[in-house]
Amino acid sequence: MTKKESEVVKMENEKKACHPKYELPSDPHAKYRYEAAVKHAKLAHEAGKSSEEVHAMFHKIMNRDINDLDSLPTDEAHKLYRSAVIHAKKAMEAGKSSEEVHEIFQKVLKSDGQGHCHGKC
């Protein structure tokens, strides 16, 4: 194991020791929100945010209501995310399965944002 890998393992073990296991809500989208919350919390921590700010960001993401489009960020960094949520919401309303909705969401997130769907999602 390299020094860098051992530092990562050490950091993850410390994180596990100081953070209780987070119980995911029962809704089908909780896992994806959790992954996004962890990603954002890690980036915030690396940017030097305080522990309180990191926890607040994590909980804000986990408690976000995706049906409330007004609560989604509108900045350039979240443009694809917002578009993916809009497409996923339309897919849910059209009766698509949870798996299909997540596939559409991921497809939009990985797109170039140029809008090739034309409502066919």
Image (cartoon, rainbow, N blue to C red):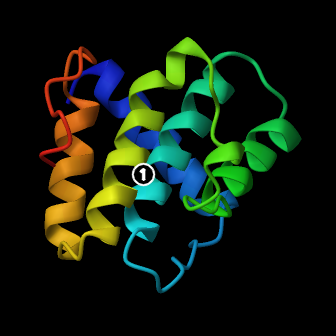
Quadrant housing residue 50? top right
Instruction: Residue at 48% x, 36% y: name it.
Output: 82
On screen, residue 97 above or below 83? below
Using residue 48 as the reference point, say whether residue 91 is left or right of it: left
Using residue 93 as the reference point, say whether residue 120 is left or right of it: left
Instruction: Residue at 51% x, 76% y: name it.
Output: 24
On screen, residue 13 above or below 82? below
Quadrant housing residue 66? bottom right
Q: Position of residue 96 (x, y in %)?
A: 18, 72
Mark 1: few, some, or many residues within 10 Å (few <14, many ≥20)?
few
Front residue of this view, candidates 74 and 60: 74
Q: Position of residue 97 (x, y in %)?
A: 18, 76
Q: Quadrant of the N terminus?
A: top left
Count of number-bearing discs: 1
Residue ID for mark 1 = 35
Instruction: Residue at 66% x, 62% y: name it.
Output: 19
Front residue of this view, candidates 61 and 18: 61
Front residue of this view, candidates 66 and 2: 66
On screen, residue 24 above or below 112? below
Front residue of this view, candidates 82 and 33: 82
Q: Amino acid at mark 1?
A: Glu
Q: Position of residue 22 (x, y in %)?
A: 58, 72
Looking at the image, which residue sits at the far bottom? Answer: 26
Quadrant housing residue 46? top right
Which structural element holds mark 1?
helix
